[in-house]
Image: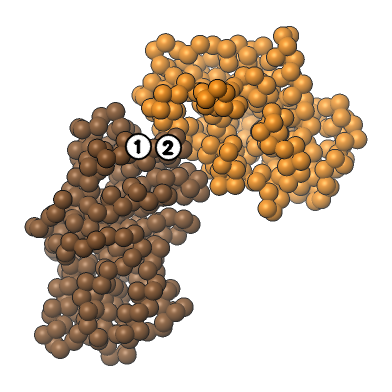
Amino acid sequence: MKFDAPTPIRDAFGKALVELGASNPNVVALTADLADAIKVQWFADKYPDRFFQMGIAESDMICVAAGLAMTGKIPFATTFATFAAGLANMAVKIAVAYNEANVKIATSHGGVCVGADGATHQGIDDIALMRAIPGMTVVVPCDANEAYKATLAIAEYVGPVYFRLGRIPTPIVDDAPFTIGKARIVREGKDVAIIACGSMVATAMEAAVALEVKKIKTTVVNMHTVKPLDVKTLVDVAGRCGAVVVAEEHSIIGGLGSAVAEALAANKPVPIEFVGIRDVFGESGEPAEILKKYGLCASDIEAAAEKVLKRK
Amino acid sequence: MGQNENGAAAMATQIRRDVIRMISSVGSGHPGGALGAADILAALYSGGMRVKDANGKGRDRLVLSNGHICAAWYSALSLSGCIDRTELNGFRRLGSRLQGHPSRKHMKEWVETSTGPLGQGASVAHGIALGLRMNGSDAKVFTLVGDGEMQEGIVWEALMTAPQYKLGNVVLFVLWNGLQIDGTVENIKNLEPIADRLRAFGWDTIEIDGHDQKAIKSVLDRPRNATGKPTAVVARTIMSKGVSFMENDRKWHGTCPNKEQAEKALSELGAAGSFTDYPAVGGSK
């Protein structure tokens, strides 16, 4: 399946899950009263015997998913990012990760673009919480095409995966092959490297075009797998460009930015600037307004690039 | 007493001896609940459940949601030939499979799910039960929870799930000794009338004396509820049952008997002088 127009990433997930329903009888799906919000309803309609509505009980859903995995199933447990990572954290940590259970935790509403629901429904620390759990793979696809392929890939992979999806339509970056843990260079330039994940990949591409006008050549890396991080690609581009900007729709504490900083500090120290949410809670508003207020626009990446170049 | 019940009673005594030795020799652990659960574990592991795969029918699953009482369970595993008796020596020690709380990562063959954070096991058990049913297995899932454990919210989430999905293959033992670390269940956060609450949640609920082999066996022999209701067994037990000076005293939830106390306990359990069977390190911590 190929998407050309901007599409909500969760829609691509929903469609891929239906395909998995046909191709892999072990795939099952669970939700905590959010079947429509994360598009798992399409799977439920087609495969009702393999769908489990768990009600508003996220920890129970995660634990039941772990139990199903013990019997050979490949469960996709779905809810909002902040509920999976925060509310059900202990279940994810022990019942899924410590058990090495083959559970896929797929969430929508990662980041601040959740519509007008406000801070309680925005996932701004989910990557940090999931990344800190031993053995957890963390995947944040950048567009509908990648989300579709990644859904199929994580079903194939054996082990716990956190799969973070956004809510609003996201521009299509491209239609390249997807491999867990293999970062994708979507644009090459010698001056500065922008490392991004999720919706911020398209924003980084927009910033790169603006920087080009200012004669600044930009590399853009789609770091769709935050863990395990593709350190080799990261060190390569950091070495070539000598300056790095990290962009994510997440707190600058503990997410992709922290992962990149940890890896570069140990392997290739270069100046880094961080574009993300600055240790504050979000609020209600239209996505475009929120992105602007919290510094998550192409212009913010552009400014960060110019700043980091001065530190080279 | 029938033959099985005699076998179970003997196994229960041996479990109690092992619990005292294991915990005392390593110098830490949770003897109170472990001694209290010995009779139920013995009933399960001496014929009450299908411990191992038989004729391709698959084994019944035991989920020890109150994972801290695992000394008794490890003993039951060793007495039913699942693990080697000598492994008990490693309990709670570096490099051993017998972790302080059951770890699937360390012992995939027998630990259906890692437990420790209370309540999670009960919830995972229902996922296992669902999966077994989907796979066409007739295996049962036995879950053990402590009474204080039921103060965890996830337990009540799980209590709603099993009746909703008609998990007639689930048998939940609520080990009720009325005590928890900081005091009595009644004073800390009351859960009575627990049987009524379980019934109200849709469970086929029975109350028994958790030390009466005949009563335990009658529960294990019951056919599945025809309507698919899960079974809950409120098993009234005595903390540290079998060791007079430890019984009904909450300090033994997580306190280790010192060498002298261990010798005394073993003597009461008909195994005087057997403490040195295990490497004596540590003591009361």
SS label for mark 1:
loop
* Chain letter tied to brown: A
Residue B91 screen position, x and y as percent: 71, 44
* Chain letter tied to orange: B
Q: Tell me the number on the disc at residue B58.
A: none
Amino acid at circle 2: Gly
Write down the residue under mark 1: A26
Subunit under mark 2: A
Subunit under mark 1: A
State the count of labels. Answer: 2
Write down the residue under mark 2: A72
SS label for mark 2:
loop
| Colour style of the rendered protein structure | by chain
- Residue at image position (47%, 21%) is B138
Q: Quadrant of the C terminus of chain A?
A: bottom left
Same chain for the residues under marks 2 and 1 in the image: yes
- Residue at image position (60%, 47%) is B106
Residue A252 screen position, x and y as percent: 33, 69
Figure quadrant of residue A293:
bottom left
Q: Are marks 2 and 1 in contact (CB under 8 Å)?
A: yes
Amino acid at circle 1: Asn
Question: B259 and B17: which one is in front?
Answer: B17
Sequence-first tag of 2 and 1: 1
Figure quadrant of residue A298:
bottom left
